[in-house]
Amino acid sequence: MDQKTVHVFKVLFGVLGNGTAFFLFLSPTITFKRIMRKKCTEQFSGIPYVMTMLNCLLYAWYGLPFVSANNFLVSTVNGTGAAMELIYVLVFIIFAPKRERAKILGLFTAVLALFSAVALVSLFALHDKTRKLFCGLAATVFAIIMFSSPLSIMIPNGCGSVLGALQLILYFIYRDNKGKGSGTTKPNGAATTADESITINGAQDGHV
């Protein structure tokens, strides 16, 4: 296969990938329409949108010609994604409760600072292949973090489920032992049951 054909396929699949990614970036609009309609973020988390924005910023930077040559399509789709995720984050901040708003604002600030640090280090301290490798690794690491960010909601519930299951297991193990060892003690050291205690007391009172 000649170089021209390879280039055509690269552009074709790049455009198809960009189109797919664009619709992926559009998918949260349903959630944010609901948030705007109810003027409340309900139980939704803003963390995945902030982390997706960081991921898009890093990949958009990676695709720039002075970092990674011939990856302009990577920059265009991720630049678009970063802009869309920024809108989602701002809407979330507007309608989030005070405590959640402060948390997302803090994360948003940290994300911008982190991206700025990566961009500045790669621009002024690194060159050529080292720059490309550094930016690629940063983008890959934070892509993994982005995909795991929805677990921020699942982790507390997961721990609660494990603890609840443990309580049920202990209940089923010890439920048949309820009331055992609760009687009085006979002179010879044997336990006296409740029925035996009633019989003894009745005999002492003159009742058979």
Image (spheres, rainbow, N blue to C red):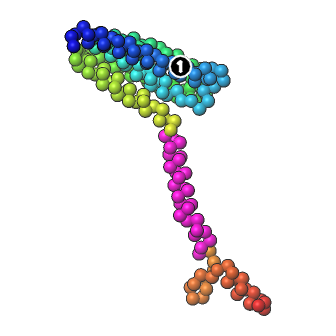
Task: Report the residue at 59% width, 75% height from top.
Answer: 181
Q: Is residue 41 magenta?
A: no
Residues rendered magenta in the picture: 155-181
- Describe residue 111's horizontal placement relative to residue 39 as left or right: left
Residue furthest to the front: 1
In the rendered image, residue 60, in percent from the top left (x then y), is placed at 37, 15
The magenta stretch spans residue 166: yes
Q: Which amino acid, mark 1?
A: Tyr
Q: Residue at x 56, y 30 (%)?
A: 44
**Residue 62 horizontal/vertical position (percent):** 32, 16
In this rendering, is residue 165 above or below 192?
Answer: above
Taking 96 as reference, is 76 left or right?
A: left
Q: Mainly helix, strand or loop, the magenta region?
A: helix
Residue 4 to residue 58: above or below: above
Asked if residue 95 shows in the view, the reply is no
Question: Residue at image x 49%, y 40%?
Answer: 155
Q: 10 Å neighbourhood of mark 1: few (<14), some, or many (≥20)? A: many
**In which quadrant of the rendered view does residue 201 lie?**
bottom right
* Label 1 SS: helix
Label 1 belongs to which residue? 88
**Residue toward you, 101 or 60:** 60
Occupied quadrant, residue 3: top left
Give the camera-side residue of 106 and 185.
185
Identify the residue shown where x is 35% and y is 28%. 141
> Is 202 on the left-hand or right-hand side of 109?
right
- x and y percentages locating residue 55 in the rendered image: 40, 22
Q: Is residue 166 visible?
A: yes
The percent position of residue 165, horizontal first and vertical second, equals 53, 52
